[in-house]
Image: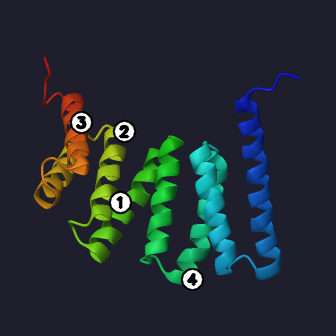
Amino acid sequence: MNTQPSEYLGRASQIDNMSRVRVVESCREALGEEHPETLSAMQELAVRFRRQGSLSWARRLFERLLAIQRRQLGRRHPQVVSNEERLSDTLFALGEFEGSRLLQERVVQARRLSLGETHPLTLSAMSQFAEILCAQGELEQASELQEIVFDTRTRVLGAEHPDTLMAEDRLYETLMEQGALYIF
């Protein structure tokens, strides 16, 4: 039997996922679906599925998790907003741009209200929203938003900070796609 290391890793990942699914089920049975430990296990499993590319599974878990968290914690709670952003990212990866856009727009508004315009999480949410706009062909709106992110990061972090440089790169990419910038 000539098994490659990648096959072992694949099997180990499957076994680990099955184990984590059992943890979620065990928590549901022992504590109830809405118990904080059950929700934490669901979130961990959803994040793992998303990271591994099991997008449909991740989506289902995030949607169920959010339904419970919104009811328990309210729509403005930081955990809810973070999981909405994770679901938005998952929907984007699935090519469901409109659903991703609606969630990410809500995330941006929630972060602006709770953290302010210059907070790194707000700026990150704005940048992700601009990426969604790009994917939908709304390049002018996307470049305006990316310019705000770039200008804010430059002012707050400085021109040479890695986050500023990344924002600059995203802005340039959008401007090139828009035809507003040419590189010879």
For residue 77, what is the image quadrant?
bottom left
Residue labelled with disc 3: 174
The label on residue 39 is none
| Observer-nearest of 32 and 169 | 169
Element type where label 3 sits in the image: helix
Q: Answer whether labels 2 and 1 touch (C-beta < 8 Å).
A: no
Residue labelled with disc 4: 72
Element type where label 4 sits in the image: helix
**Mark 3 nearby-residue class (10 Å; few <14, some 14–19, many ≥20):** many
Please tell me whether residue 102 is drawn above or below residue 13 in the rendered image: below
For residue 105, what is the image quadrant?
bottom left
Instruction: Check disc 3 and give the amino acid type.
Output: Thr
Residue labelled with disc 1: 105
Q: Answer whether labels 4 and 2 touch (C-beta < 8 Å).
A: no
Element type where label 1 sits in the image: helix
* Discs 3/2, front: 3
The x, y position of residue 30, in whole percent, is 82, 79
Mark 2–mark 1 distance (CA, rounded to whole Å): 14 Å
The x, y position of residue 165, in whole percent, is 21, 43
The label on residue 135 is 2
